Image: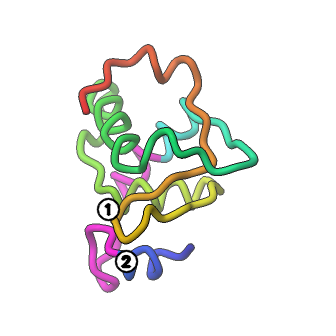
Amino acid sequence: MTAMAIGQWGMNRGMDEPFDKAEIATARAWIRKFVVPTKTIRRKYSSYILKHVAEHWGGTVRRESYITNGAFIEAARLEGYKIAPIGMSPNAYFNMHLLREAYAMEWSV
């Protein structure tokens, strides 16, 4: 899914406004550290929940402490994850499995 398609999907930004690179970098770093791919889409945590967890982590490691939903989805796409829209909402599910270390963090969602 391209950034343009994500913008059309209603991901917090217009098609002509790019996603914030620092937000994407933080989300990508969190994904690399705490997530592994699965063969199928997992419907346990949505992009909205995961972006909040990544934000919390970002704030604790002196990275971005705010990540838009669209920036998180774009980060997942750039990391090679599959994206499954959730109905007409701006949220998505992914083929992601959270590592045990992700559950050790405080989740303030």
Residue 25 higher or lower than 3, as above or below: above
Residue 18: in magenta span: yes
Residue 10 higher or lower than 27, as above or below: below
Q: Give the farthest residue toward the right.
A: 39
- Circle 2 SS class: helix
Q: Position of residue 79 (x, y in %)?
A: 60, 53
* Residue at image point 65% right, 36% down: 36
Amino acid found under the numbered disc labelled 2: Gly
What whole-number distance in Å separates the C-alpha atoms at marks 2 and 1? 13 Å
Mark 1 nearby-residue class (10 Å; few <14, some 14–19, many ≥20): few
- For the stretch drawn in magenta, the main secondary structure is loop
Please report contact status of discs 2 and 1: CB closer than 8 Å, yes or no.
no
Report whether 84 appears left or right of 57.
Answer: right
Q: In this figure, which residue is indicated by the disc labeled 1?
A: 20
Q: Position of residue 31 (x, y in %)?
A: 53, 40
* Residue at image point 31% right, 25% down: 107
Report whether 99 appears left or right of 69.
Answer: right
Q: Give the farthest residue toward the top.
A: 104
Amino acid found under the numbered disc labelled 1: Asp
Nearest-to-viewer mark from 2 and 1: 2
Q: In this figure, which residue is indicated by the disc labeled 2?
A: 7
* Residue at image point 37% right, 77% down: 7
- Please name whichever residue, 100 or 25, is drawn nearer the observer in this view of the structure: 100
Q: Earlier in the sequence, mark 2 or mark 1?
A: 2
- Please name whichever residue, 31 or 41, is drawn nearer the observer in this view of the structure: 41
Q: Quadrant of the C terminus?
A: top left
Q: Position of residue 3 (x, y in %)?
A: 46, 75
Q: Provide the residue span drawn in magenta.
A: 10-27
Q: Quadrant of the N terminus?
A: bottom right
